[in-house]
Image: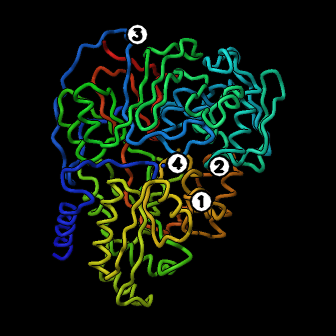
Amino acid sequence: MKRKSLALALAAVLCVSSLTACGSSGNDSKKDTADKGTEAGTESGGETEQVEKEQIEVPDEPTKGGTLTVSLSSSPRNLDPAKYTGSYEGQVINNVCDRVVEYNKDLSEIVPSLAEDWTVSDDGLTYVFKIRQGVKFQKGEYQDGREMTAEDIAYSLNRSAKDSSLNRLDMLENAEVTGDWEVTCTLAEPNAAFLTALTDAGNSIVPKEEVEGWGDDFGAHLVGTGPFAMESFELDQQSVLVKNPDYWVAEPNLDKLVFKVITDSNQAANALKTGEIDIASSITGEAVKSVRDDSKLQLMEMPGLHVAYIYFNQVNGPTADKKVREALIKAINVEEMTASIYQYGEAVPAKLSLPPGSWGYDASCEELVPDYDPEGAKKLLTEAGYPDGFECDLYISNTALREKMATLVQAYLKTNLNVTVNINKSEWGTFSESAASGNADMYGMSWTWYPDPYFFLNKLFSSKEIGALGNGQGFSNAEVDQLLDDALKATDQNERAEMYKKALRIVTEELPGIFYSNENVIHGLNPEVQDFVQKADNQMFFVTPWTNVWKVQ
């Protein structure tokens, strides 16, 4: 009965909270940053009813032309690949530029792109890429659509290794031209995640003339070899792209691709209903239900490569004590909390710091996470020397889903442990600085990247990342460090997976935080949109070897 009463009380807290009133937008920013899903979902823990969708007449052959408008739930800030920091910039960059290699349709394999082929030395230190010929840059201010060369590949990769704001290519020691159409990359030490890193938007290939000509303004005048060229970029408004008729993969079916900033999910859903936009990306909260229940719209849902979590300080304050961390975990009913945060089935409860979609996931580690046990939590906190609780700070970004989470955590810990949680919310830049500083008692955010465990476990738990956003709480374990390092030196994925699973088990046993949900990738579409492929990493591509998106006119 106590658990039932607490659940009702917490629901009431959410309804009266000034942070997130019942029925308000569930917009969230993934800065905190594969095929079509079903029309069914869950609402407040129960099954939703199937809604019969109206069918439109679709011609046998793709319609050429037209403009496709896509909403982004946060504004891109800098479209220079070396300087971008959020997934929203990545959506635009990925459609203006290409990379040396790419992930395939379902993120299961690295495939050729601007490199037709490559070889790797036995010691894993040298990668030799055969560069594709006949690929042209879009026309810009400082070059007239010239052919891309091996020099452009080497320049772009070296620039990223030196200047990337998030160290996206820090394993690269040097890229050099070793033939007319050949580039050799030398790593500082073996790193099996190198090819995966090359698929990131931050490692896109750009022309030196445009970078140097525009200087700090290059991001607003981005030029690449991709399917769309940038026509205009209006900060906090929209990015307008026009088709590149000379794109080496295929001529785009669409004439224009517009990324429009709509920060409120409900407004994005309304814009979808009125036809102002064609795709509402990353919608959450009531907007999901609105699209799901509209017979004229389509909802695409799939599990994402995503973990939302609360990270405990490993070095300073009460949470440096493992007993305290265990007590805090036992005091929070994760399943109940997740159902309250994601009322329309936007996520599922989680337990581990790696998403189930990663090939390093080990379900047997789930049993290491303590169950909800308020009485056991009180006993542990008393043993740790805090019989009357304590006061601590929880840092979050000012997004709806994080605010809901923080409110619930505050209520759970006060009710079950007399722990007072002060919620500190701020915009992304301020939050990320606080989280990376090592001074936060706890911080709550989410992490989404690639299937390779490196991009989760290494970035969140390697001692090398202490002081960065991923490991701002100072997690350090010599055995974990060794396993993570060894996994990068191995070339066989099965061997790497076993090392990551061992590291995951140790990390989980240390109870570094509460990993409470795996959010879905959710898009709303007008039915006129054809051949759009949804991906688990939430990246949107509109012309690839496997799809060329078009609209029924």
Residue located beneath label 4 in the image: 359
Residue located beneath label 2 in the image: 167
Between the C-alphas of marks 1 and 2, the distance is 10 Å
Q: Residue at x 36, y 45 (%)?
A: 520
User: What percent of the width, then of the height, locates residue 466?
Assistant: 62, 64
Residue located beneath label 1 in the image: 468
Determine whether 276 is above or below 10 in the image. Answer: above
Between circles 4 and 2, the one closer to the viewer is: 2
Residue located beneath label 3 in the image: 64
Determine whether 230 is above or below 315 in the image. Answer: above
Answer left or right for 323 relative to 418.
right
User: What percent of the width, then of the height, locates residue 442?
Assistant: 45, 69
Quick one: SS at disc 2? loop
Q: Residue at x 53, y 44 (%)?
A: 450
> Label 1 neighbourhood size at 10 Å, few (<14), some (14-19), many (20+)?
some
* Marks 3 & 1, CB-CB < 8 Å contact: no
Q: Residue at x 45, y 65 (%)?
A: 443
How many numbered discs, if any?
Answer: 4
Q: Residue furthest right?
A: 178
